[in-house]
Image: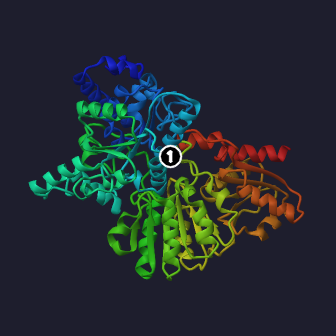
Amino acid sequence: MIERIKSPNDLKLLNNKELGDLSEELRDVIIKRVSENGGHLASNLGVVELAVALHYVFDSPKDKIIWDVGHQSYPHKLLTGRYDKFHTLRRNKGISGFPKISESEHDSFGTGHSSTSISAALGSLVGRDLKGDGGKVIAVIGDGALTSGLAFEGLNQAGHLGKDLIVILNNNEMSISKNVGALSSYLSKVITGTFYKNISQELLKIREDIEIITKKRDSPKNIFMPGGLFEDLGFEYIQPIDGHNITLLIETLKKARDGNKLTLVHIVTKKGKGYKFSENDPCTYHAMGPFVVKTGIQCSSTKKGCVSFSDTFGDSMIELAEKDENIVAITAAMKEGTGLVEFAEKFPDRFYDVGIAESHAVTFAAGLATRGIKPVVALYSTFLQRSYDQIIHDVCLQNLPVIFAIDRAGLVGEDGPTHHGVFDISFLSNIPNLIFMSPKDTEELKEMMRLAVKCDSPVAIRYPREKMESMCYQRDEIKVGKWESFGEGKDVAILAVGNTVYPSLKAAEILQKKGIDSMVINARFIKPLDFEIIEKVGNSIGKIVTVEEGVLRGGFGSSVLTHLSNSKIQVDLKMIGIPDEFVEHGPQFLLKDNYGISADGIVKTVEDLLVF
């Protein structure tokens, strides 16, 4: 049936039973494709009926459907003419795993980070009215995403403007991890009916009488009726319905469409529905690499003996916390991804998952630091961007000893431009008081964590989404602002940051066979720079290549060049990194090759420099 759906208009030719059959077929297609390509599984399986109902009731692209985060956009893509390309999902030059304006007219807003849909939809709606255009605007947001302050900022203005925005609250009690916080508890009470489950028939009759007498949002009915929070914000609230019942969804969405009011439709879904492994463990099956459909077992190409940076960080946190009771871990709905599961189990009173609220996480940590606590904020690089103001004003300006553990720094692969952590060097290295490190391997990460908890100033440590074997290279004691050197380097000095050190060492071996003597420098401190080494190689060698898995503008290489210029040292210098463009999705190795951040790429850059 899916092969016949070339556009959402084709859905309107189907009856409700056929729509239900189509939903099951969509699930089969998604499971098969994710098992081969990897991707977001449980979140997409949970919204299949919702996607079908939305495209059945509304008229995309005239009506704008905006998905929050985009983890759940696969059925939407399949229903909007992309079935023939779906085999390219998340593959280089294939379709994205997230909504993308340039990919389809039905993707009315690009997403990838949480909690943007309400604000974006409200802006689209106001733009519609300013332009005199028609059509409805629908924002889909999950209960996990609703914990973000940005979502409430959108709800606040939406209530103030009172326009006919439709918000679909998809309540599955999950973000990536299990939801936490007071709002999550509130929504749980709403969907379980505990607001009024034990109320007697007499009180229910009173509620009915009150509804007849008054329609005021501040009426006593809020004592008995769920959704009072949203009604107080100005929304017409449609109480929880089964998000997997096609018929009920269609009827409800038609009511919201025809009401021409500011409306919030509350639906309840099961994350991972239709695939027993993801239903039983929606956290693990939220985002998957390739896996075997029959068993649910993920295929792994990782060599034995390899350890991830995330796991190493988690182990280090436990080791340090056992020795220092002031160490506290904070994350934003990413306990599993950041390697803090065991820490949370072992030190429940010293672990805080604040939900999808990165800005709050940082200022919360700053407050802890004023009391002599040693907070460690573990976030992905791409999500740390959301808390930039708090990092500057609340932490670094006050010189508070908060540690930022920045996971997924650099190129992350198939999740693409919204998730590549390539900007942190540029936006953090210019902040006063901040010590900024990047380890060459997991062993060095452990040493950096031990150093970080001893510092009386803010510290950031960036590390990649990679697993590494233990290496046997020399290990100097880590001191703030001091780098590590390998080789003599009569011909060229290669200054490498973090996980680019080992490719640089491999490049040095290749160059040596070609008669080129290179020095490799582990520039493990991005800030402060090791000015002594920079000046030494600038004066003695005069030819430098910098390597970083981050943007070049304002990056590590730029900082090195600035110091050489200020010191009036003239050198021939080439920088390897990400140019002024967004990096598309694709395998990490391919992306690194494309940008020269590989042993072969470094060799070529050195040879070009020496020829020049």
* Residue 414 visible here: no
Residue 74 vs 268, above or below: the answer is above
Q: Is residue 237 above or below residue 368?
A: above
Instruction: Tell me the SS state at disc 1.
Output: helix
Identify the residue at the far left of this view.
201
Residue closer to the observer: 342 or 127: 127
Q: Position of residue 314 (x, y in %)?
A: 43, 66
Q: Which residue is mark 1?
A: 119
Identify the residue at the far front of this view: 213
User: Residue placed at 50% from the left, 37% from the top?
Assistant: 125
**Way the structure is coloured:** rainbow
Q: Position of residue 106 (x, y in %)?
A: 48, 28
Amino acid of disc 1: Ser
Q: Is 514 on the left or on the right of 410, as rendered?
A: right
Q: Quadrant of residue 601?
A: top right
Rendered residue at 34%/26% (across/down): 56
Q: Point out the image quarter for the N terminus.
A: top left
Q: Residue at x 26, y 29 (%)?
A: 24
Q: Position of residue 102 (x, y in %)?
A: 57, 31
